Image: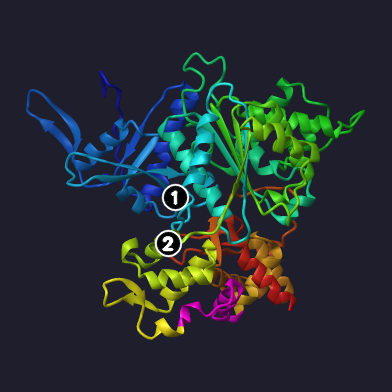
């Protein structure tokens, strides 16, 4: 339809003869993203998509003299409303689509009023796999409103023209909610920029202990993200630079004619790195070193050069590559968690980016520097705490304990009631025992619900059931370690043993890595590997259900150097427990829900 409002395309999924299993998640939503991205990236045309699910009339409308083929119904009206919404960042869906898109993540947007709906309709923006890896928002997150507002204001200011780059440090002990705060703050900042239609690049990384031993480890994932961006060319005549939001996603980065495999994306990243290196006259040997060391380019081996590039030259050029790759955006947010594990060379690249760039906000989450010294250059740290702080370019946020009002709000979320309905004595008990530590508080509340120790009181409030008020059974733990140990004791032997192996592998690990080490340590013959893999799968499901680990589906990476036994690699397990199909073990990535779990499990191994 072409009218005074522009060009409108109406597409349907699910008509008779064209229905498919998992149609919403595997066909409809990917199609929305591909069309939206292709219009922006290949034609420079801005577009907005509204996607809904519902019963409609689809057929001929009109009389003999004038009639047309049309799609009519409340869900069609709602799709049009979402498409035309001023808050639409690119793709908006209704709640019915969200419910059908199992396994996907969404950002909620302000509800809208639509014809045919008695109430306001909840709407969402779908997140891609890469966006979801930035961290999931904790549904029990409470408080920290002033601190989040600081991050949001800095993010918005970073999109102003020629704004100096800024850096924020978020300090917090383990269990203080530092990581949850970083995720929530970035979530709010991203949502704010989307609604203001700011062109922003967001990349996020969580470092681990082993990263401190690997040179430039921080930029392995960061370079993959920023090099997979598809900016509108500077000399494009089809659209002005900076008119479209950036979509560095599994679907949104592809053109209509491109494949959707990881190898295709990897080749695209390496090709862009190669083009940037040529354009910027990279130091000799830089492409081979960075391509192989950081991006796993096994085809282009490091060739012999007359003189190896100096480390300072590599650092400066890596900073230039990052700045060049994100120069099409109005602002860049570089969100980094657990920066106490970042290696010294990565810190030097970050310093160079900060010193030589504009419009970049670097958010660093870290344990207290007194206990976990940073590998950052002393002169740079002095500069940050001196002239940068005075000039408003350096900000520090310390995550403090929750107050009683925050505890009440978290209790209300856990108990599924209003905050005013939570008993004062119950809140006081939880606050006193947890010390206001968010994770300890959450575990105490979950434990109380799990044991059925809370319920309605005669006063109409919700609090301790009769009998629990004196014994405080839900608060019998001296610390969070004791509480977690009790929960581990309730697991079966196979699950506990699997978690022991997992803790050794690190905060994050792949299923095939866990399977390989389990098979070797337990001396399982190849004939029994598939049965053991299924048992291990069930153990991981139990640990996930218990909230010990989180499960994601990762990308298949061809690093060219894997030595995993073929008998292990060939095993395929149905991870969903349904008949929807199976997932290659290499795709499955687990991570401990909180580092306290891993610390407690390792302490058991050392006892």
User: Can residue 488 be found in the magenta stretch?
Assistant: yes
Q: Nearer the viewer, residue 373 or 146?
A: 146
For the N terminus, the image quarter is top left
Task: Locate residue 565 relative to residue 365 in the image: left or right.
Answer: right
- Image spot of residue 234 (x, y percent): 57, 17
The image's mark for residue 125 is none
Nearest the camera: 437 or 252? 437
Kindly identify the residue that appears in the image at 43 percent across and 26 percent down.
39
With respect to residue 315, does 539 lie above or below?
A: below
Please name which of the two marks, 1 or 2, marks the residue nearer to the observer.
2
Prevailing secondary structure class for the magenta stretch in the rendered image: helix
Decide which of 227, 576 is in the foreground and name it.
227
- The correct choice, above or below, for 291 with respect to 519 in the image is above
**What is the quadrant of residue 323 in the picture?**
top right
Secondary structure under tag 2 reads: helix
Q: Residue at x 61, y 76 (%)?
A: 496
In this rendering, does residue 597 appear at all?
A: yes
Q: How is the image coloured?
A: rainbow
Q: Could you tell me residue 80's position as x and y percent?
A: 26, 34
Instruction: Name which of mark 1 and mark 2 comes first in the sequence.
Output: 1
Q: Residues within 10 Å of mark 1 (few under 14, many from 20)?
A: some
Residue for badge 1: 105
Report the disc number at residue 410: 2
Instruction: Locate residue 129 relative to residue 410 in the image: left or right.
Output: right
Q: Secondary structure at mark 1?
A: strand
Q: What residue do we see at 55% from left, 21% from top?
A: 161
Distance from the alpha carbon under mark 1 to that under mark 2 = 22 Å
Residue stretch in magenta: 472-493
Above or below residue 540? Residue 7 is above
């Amino acid at each position: 339809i072409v009218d005074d409002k522009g060009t409108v395309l109406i597409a349907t999924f699910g008509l008779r003869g064209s229905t498919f299993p998992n149609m919403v998640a595997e066909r409809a939503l990917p199609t929305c993203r591909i069309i939206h991205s292709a219009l922006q990236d290949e034609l420079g045309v801005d577009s907005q998509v509204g996607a809904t699910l519902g019963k409609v009339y689809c057929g001929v409308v009109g009389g003999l003299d004038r009639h047309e083929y049309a799609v009519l119904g409340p869900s069609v009206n709602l799709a049009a409303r979402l498409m035309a919404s001023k808050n639409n960042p690119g793709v908006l869906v209704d709640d019915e689509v969200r419910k059908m898109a199992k396994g996907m993540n969404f950002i909620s947007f302000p509800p809208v009023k639509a014809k045919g709906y008695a109430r306001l309709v909840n709407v969402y923006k779908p997140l891609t796999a890469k966006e979801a890896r930035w961290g999931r928002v904790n549904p029990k997150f409470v408080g920290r409103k002033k601190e989040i507002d600081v991050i949001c204001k800095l993010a918005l200011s970073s999109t102003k023209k020629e704004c100096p780059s800024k850096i924020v440090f978020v300090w917090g002990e383990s269990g203080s909610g530092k990581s949850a705060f970083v995720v929530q703050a970035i979530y709010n900042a991203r949502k704010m920029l989307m609604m203001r239609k700011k062109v922003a690049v967001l990349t996020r990384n969580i470092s681990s202990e082993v990263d401190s031993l690997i040179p430039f480890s921080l930029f392995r994932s960061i370079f993959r993200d920023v090099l997979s961006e598809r900016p509108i060319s500077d000399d494009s005549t089809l659209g002005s630079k900076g008119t479209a939001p950036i979509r560095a996603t599994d679907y949104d980065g592809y053109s209509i004619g491109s494949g959707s495999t990881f190898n295709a994306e990897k080749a695209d990243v390496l090709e862009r790195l190669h083009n940037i290196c040529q354009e910027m006259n990279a130091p000799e040997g830089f492409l081979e070193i960075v391509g192989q060391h950081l991006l796993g380019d096994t085809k282009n081996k490091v060739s012999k050069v007359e003189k190896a590039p100096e480390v300072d030259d590599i650092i400066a050029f890596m900073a230039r590559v990052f700045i060049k790759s994100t120069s099409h955006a109005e602002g860049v947010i570089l969100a980094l968690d657990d920066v106490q594990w970042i290696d010294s060379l990565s810190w030097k690249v970050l310093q160079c980016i900060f010193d030589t760039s504009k419009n970049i906000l670097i958010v660093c989450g870290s344990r207290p520097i007194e206990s976990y010294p940073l590998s950052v250059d002393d002169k740079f740290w002095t500069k940050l705490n001196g002239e940068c702080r005075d000039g408003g370019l350096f900000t520090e946020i310390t995550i403090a304990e929750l107050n009683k009002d925050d505890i009440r709000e978290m209790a209300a979320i856990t108990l599924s009631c209003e905050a005013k309905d939570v008993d004062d004595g119950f809140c006081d008990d939880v606050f006193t025992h947890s010390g206001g530590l968010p994770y300890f508080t959450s575990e105490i509340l979950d434990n109380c619900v799990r044991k059925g120790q809370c319920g309605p009181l005669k006063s109409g409030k919700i609090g301790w059931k009769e009998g629990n008020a004196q014994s405080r059974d839900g608060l019998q733990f001296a610390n969070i370690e004791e509480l977690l140990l009790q929960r581990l004791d309730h697991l079966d032997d196979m699950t506990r043993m699997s978690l022991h192996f997992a803790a050794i592998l690190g905060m994050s690990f792949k299923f095939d890595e866990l399977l390989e080490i389990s098979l070797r340590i337990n001396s399982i013959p190849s004939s029994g590997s598939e049965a053991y893999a299924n048992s291990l799968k069930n153990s991981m499901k139990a640990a996930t259900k218990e909230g010990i680990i989180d499960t994601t589906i990762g990308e298949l990476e061809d690093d060219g150097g894997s030595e995993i036994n073929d008998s292990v690699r060939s095993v395929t397990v149905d991870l969903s427990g349904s008949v929807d199909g199976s997932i290659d073990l290499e795709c499955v990535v687990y991570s401990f829900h909180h580092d306290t779990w891993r610390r407690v499990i390792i302490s058991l191994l050392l006892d």
